[in-house]
Image (tube, grey):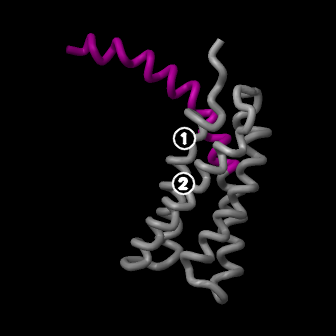
Amino acid sequence: MSMGFEATRPGATALIRRQLPLFLRYAVAGAVGTSCHYLTMFLLLGVLTPVIASTVGALVGLVVNYQIARMWVFRGRDSLSYPFAKFFIVALTGVGVNAAILSLAILYSPVWTGQIVATGCALLSGYVLNDLWSFRARKA
């Protein structure tokens, strides 16, 4: 029985070893973009609804995240002619995830609690999509 588990363990360990540093860089880049997102949202909350203020903030964060992802997180991956288009599609998907989750969360919790949950969901989905699609490494 343990033979099956042991056979898959080295592959899982290698995957974690390969993905963890990349994910941590992505999370740091995301923290910078999220700071821009939250600051923009905070400044707009008195003028706009929470969902619209958050969406505008997410778009500001999108631009910041792209630059950091291209230059630091996924550097050296030159497989795409137009990585911004794919990154933008992924980011818009993240904006949609953020808006949908925040729209539901504010029905049951304070705005900032919902925003933190929405941000976590957008972070995970964005990393997976950017790694597998936007900045996919070219196969030799």
Q: Are marks 2 and 1 in contact (CB under 8 Å)?
A: yes
- Dot 2 corresponds to which residue? 93
Q: CA distance from mark 2 to mark 1?
A: 10 Å
Part of the protein shown in magenta: 1-29
Q: Is residue 86 magenta?
A: no
Closer to the chain start, of discs 2 and 1, is 2
The one of 2 and 44 positioned closer to us in this rendering: 44
Where is 86 relative to 54, above or below? Answer: above
- Dot 1 corresponds to which residue? 129
Residue drawn 62% across the image and 47% down it? 27
Relative to 53, 118 lies left or right:
left
Magenta region's main secondary structure?
helix
Element on which disc 2 rests? helix
Where is 105 relative to 33, above or below? Answer: below
Q: Quadrant of residue 34?
A: bottom right
Where is 86 relative to 43, above or below? Answer: above
